[in-house]
Amino acid sequence: MTNHGFETRAIHAGQEPDEQTGAVTVPVHLATTYAQQGVNEHKGFEYSRTGNPTRVALETSIAALEGVAHGFAFGSGMAAEDAILRMLKPGDNVLLGNDAYGGTFRLLDKVYAQVGVTWTAVDLTKPELVAEAWTENTKLVWLETPTNPNLNVFDIAAVAAQAHAQGGLCIVDNTFATPYLQQPASLGADLVVHSATKYLGGHSDVVGGLVATDRDDLAEHLGFTQNATGAVISPFDCYLLLRGMKTLGIRMDRHFANATAIVELLVDHPQIETVLYPGLPGHPGHEVAAQQMRNFGGMVSFIPVGGADEAHRIVTSTTLFTLAESLGAVESLIEVPAGMTHGSTAGSPLEVDPALVRLSVGIETIDDLLDDIKQALG
Ligand SMILES: *Cc1c(COP(=O)(O)O)cnc(C)c1O
C-alpha cells in the first residue's frame, strides 16, 4: 500500500474486501467481546475497547495517509490530544504555538495546569524562539499549521529540528491541512494529531480524533493510554470516517478552488480590511506553505472594515454560509472565533481579534458562494 498514491491509499489501505463475504466496504463490527479458543488465545481481538476490527481499519488508513507505521483512533480530537498529553508529568512544560484551537489551549490551561503541567506560548513563525523558550522542564512543542483561526503558517521541519536539538518532541495538529495537503511526519513531526470531525469526516456527521506516528515508543504509550483510559471511538463512527476519507483528495481540491475564488473577491472588496489566507503571495507564511503543502486549503479568515459589530452583522447576513462552529465539511460555514470556537483564549496570548471572521469554504457551486458573500458584505 505504501507505494500507492494518496487517493488509492485513502480508498484501499486497511480496507481489503471482507475475507468471509467479499464485502467491499469494511463491516461495522459491533461485538464488544470475542470468542477465545483457550485462555488468551484469540484471533487478535479480545474486547472492543482494547481493539475493534472496524477501528483497526481506520487506524491503518490514517497511518497509511500520514505515511507512518501506527495509527490510533479516539472519540474526539480532544480525546486524541488528551491521550498524547498523558505522557506528561507534574512540572513538565509545553511550548504552544501562539495561535491554536481554543479547546487545545483550554485543555492545557484548565485541565493539565491542575496537575502541574505548564505551557508557554511561542511565536513559531520564528522557529529560533523555540530554543529561547525551552527550559529544562520542557518536553514538547505543540503546533498547528495553518493555525486556527488566524491561518499563520509554521515551518514544520524547522520547528521539529529545534525541538529535536533540545531533546524534545514536535507534535503537529494537522486538522486544517489534512494528510492530503501536508504530511508532518515526513518533515520531522513525532506525532500527528487530527480532529477527524473536520475535513477527514467531511460531512458534519461524526466526531472523532486520530493520531499517527512512526515512533514505536510513542505508539506504545498511545496504545496503552487508549486502552487504559478508554476514550475510544464507536465502530459506526469509524465507518463514517473511513467513508469520508475515501473522497478527501477530491474534496480538498474543490475546497481549495472555491476558497481561492472567495479570496479573490475579498481582497478587492472595499468592505474588507484584511484577508488572511496562506495562498496569498503577500501572506508572511506563503513561501513556507507553498513548500510544505500541496495547496493552501479551504479555510479563509478576514477582518471587515467596521470591526466587531460589522463582523457580527456579516455572519448573520449570509444565507448559504451557515453561522456555526466546526469546519471542514462539504457545506460552507461562517463564524466569529473570538465569541465562539476560541472564547477560552480571551485574556491570553492566544486571544483572537473580535472582528475576525472565519470561513470554512465548502464545495457548493462557487457562483452561489460568491453571490452569498457579496450580498452579505453589501
Ligand atoms: C476542532 C479542532 C480540535 C478538536 O477536535 P474535536 O473533534 O472537536 O474534539 C482540535 N484541533 C483543531 C485545529 C480543531 O479545529
Image (tube, rainbow, N blue to C red):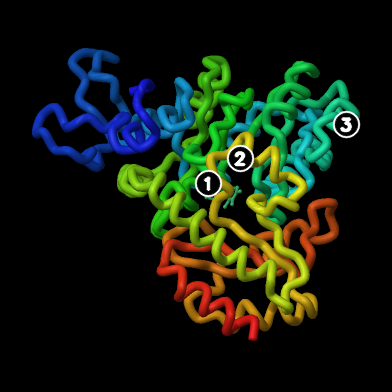
Q: How many marks?
A: 3
Tell whether label 2 touches label 1 (CB within 8 Å).
Answer: yes
Tell whether label 3 touches label 2 (CB within 8 Å).
Answer: no
Disc 3: CA contacts within 10 A as few (<14), some (14-19) or many (>=20): few
Disc 2: CA contacts within 10 A as few (<14), some (14-19) or many (>=20): many
Say which label, 1 or 2, has the lower sequence index.
2
Asked whether mark 2 lies closer than 8 Å to ligand 1, one says: yes
Q: Report which residue position mark 2 lands on.
A: 173
Q: Is residue 372 above or below residue 258?
A: below
Q: What element does badge 1 sit on?
A: strand
Q: Distance of mark 3 from mark 1, alpha carbons?
A: 27 Å
Examine the image and state in which quarter residue 265 appears: bottom right
User: Residue 373: percent from the left, percent from the top?
Assistant: 57, 76
Amino acid, disc 2: Asp
Examine the image and state in which quarter residue 81 appears: top right
Asked whether mark 1 lies closer than 8 Å to ligand 1, one says: yes
The residue lying at 72 percent from left, 43 percent from top is: 108
The residue lying at 57 percent from left, 26 percent from top is: 185
Q: What element does badge 2 sit on?
A: strand
Q: Report which residue position mark 3 lands on.
A: 133
